[in-house]
Image (cartoon, rainbow, N blue to C red):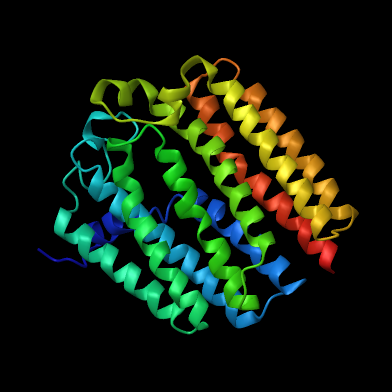
Amino acid sequence: MNFFCKEKRQAYAELMRINKPIGTLLLLWPTLWALWIAAQGFPDLSVLIVFSAGVFLMRSAGCVINDFADRNIDGFVERTKYRPLPSGRATSTEAIILFLLLAISSFLLVLTQNTLTIQLSFAGLLLAFSYPFMKRFTQLPQLALGLAFSWSIPMAFAAQANALPAVVWIIFAVNIIWTIAYDTLYAMVDREDDLKIGVKSTAILFADNDKVIIALLQLTSLILLILLGWLEDLNWSYFIALLVAAGLFLRQQLQIKNREKAACFKAFLDNNYVGFVIFSGLFLGYL
């Protein structure tokens, strides 16, 4: 078997979700929030490059290990049954090797940063590896994803400022809450299949209260972002960005009013705009 033939390269790219960058973007925006606040403006170029590349590598690694963890159940879910592992286009061994290559590459990037950042990276790797298995043990796997997706925040802040002040943990909390909200939208797409195969999620846990709880999570994230702006003395552009983000959240609520799968998935995807808008407010505010 040629491990580098066109078909294999395509399978590896799908394992890494190169063709679906939404996860990378949702991980990137909060990382950029942290970098800009830590630097009080444009961060060091070397740090920006390392974390932009690291976001891509670790998100890709997370997708690969997720597919490995789900290799025996993805075939029973309509949305995932054609992924490389259940369809037989890639093997479990190949997935593990790809995960290790991506994780090692990411760690080599981290080694260019300060000691605090390197220390934090070990927890980040553990979170990225463990998240995919959480849906078997807890009804809150979206919380585990929130922790994994948010760990780049203290790492990025530490790389830029070599410190972890209280403001870092406000950004961290915002992102965990926001991640639970948007990943519940994602889980609503698979809720029927997940119930059949016994996979747990907040979409199942929240049941008929899903829309209300998502709205409360979105509201809480906005309140914390307002607190962040007040503590950091951010200017009008940031608060206008929060108003736009609130409007985007409202639109998501309207999109999911009937819980249609396509609408829930579209609402999930639209969270990219939320992250971008907030970053834009920060970027303009620090100019």
Q: Nearer the viewer, residue 5 or 147?
A: 147
* Residue 139 at x, y percent in the picture: 38, 31
Residue 5 visible (yes or no): yes
- Assign the N terminus to one quadrant of the image: bottom left
Query: On the rendered structure, is 133 left or right of 31?
Result: left
Q: Nearer the viewer, residue 270 or 104?
A: 104
Query: On the rendered structure, is 82 left or right of 262?
Result: left
* Residue 11 at x, y percent in the picture: 27, 54
- Marks counted in the figure total 0
* Residue 100 at x, y percent in the picture: 27, 67
| Residue lying at the far front of the rendered structure | 166
* Residue 187 at x, y percent in the picture: 43, 31
Residue at position x 43%, y 82% in the image: 111
- Assign the C terminus to one quadrant of the image: bottom right
Height in image: 175 above or below 253? below
Height in image: 14 above or below 79? below
Residue 15 visible (yes or no): no
Q: Nearer the viewer, residue 215 or 28?
A: 215
Query: On the rendered structure, is 216 left or right of 201?
Result: right
| Residue lying at the far left of the rendered structure | 1
Residue at position x 34%, y 68% in the image: 103
Which picture quadrant has residue 60? Answer: bottom left
Residue at position x 43%, y 27% in the image: 189
Query: On the rendered structure, is 181 left or right of 237?
Result: left
Height in image: 220 above or below 238? above
Which picture quadrant has residue 229? Answer: bottom right
